[in-house]
Image: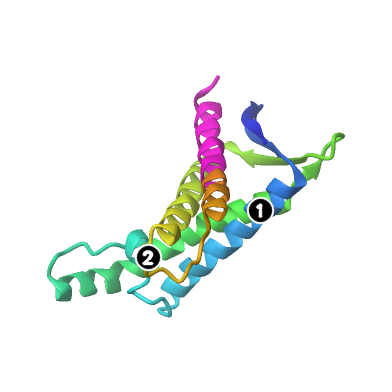
Amino acid sequence: MKPWRRDGDALVLELTADEATMLTRLVAQVRQVFVAVRDGEADRADPVVERLFPAAYEDEELADEFRRLTSDDQAALRLDRQRAMARDLAAHATVVDERVRVEVPEESADAWLAGIGDIRIVLHTRVQQGPTSHLDLTADDLAQFQAVVDWLGYAQGSLVEAVVSD
């Protein structure tokens, strides 16, 4: 991946085909979480759901009422971010060196920043479920996983730099 850069009124990211495929799949997988929350089908005990939609109150009844009143809107907002990312990824161009060029309108930068952040939260939460986790990860798996999370962090950081550049 090349860092994000500004190109007129757009922000541009160039990825390898494998990176573009991975990011597209991550966006699709995270969207499923938000769809489940929005549709009332999410397991509230899922650590990812708890992390993305935390209790606003210590009192369980108040926390449940708060979730009932706000979860749909919160999930819809997060879902819109992932949709924007998916749309921009799908509209990519392939440049001369076979890299995938993703051009994002400047007004979509916030959706990308928050959307990448949501993906990172989901990934971190899934791996940090502890010894009772259903994930059976080896040290190599964890290293690869950390490389993906670091890659996303780099993408997010370079997008911030491109947004604030003149």
**Can you give x and y, in whole percent of width and height, for residue 150 in the image?**
52, 41
Instruction: Write down the quadrant of residue 101 in the picture.
Output: top right
Which SS class for mark 2? loop
**Can you give x and y, in whole percent of width and height, for residue 52 in the image?**
36, 60
Q: Which amino acid does label 1 sit on?
A: Met
Circle 2 residues within 10 Å: few <14, some 14–19, many ≥20: few
- Judging by the rendered image, the residue that carries numbered circle 2 is 131
Which label is found at residue 22? Answer: 1
- Residue placed at 58% from the left, 49% from the top? 144
Name the side, left or right, on which 69 lies relative to 165: left
- Residue placed at 55% from the left, 31% from the top? 158
Q: What residue type is labelled 2?
A: Pro
Q: Most extreme residue toward the front, as rendered?
A: 139
**Magenta stretch, overall SS:** helix
Asked if labels 1 and 2 touch by Cβ distance under 8 angstroms, the answer is no
- Residue placed at 23% from the left, 74% from the top? 64
Q: What stretch is highlighted in magenta?
A: 149-166
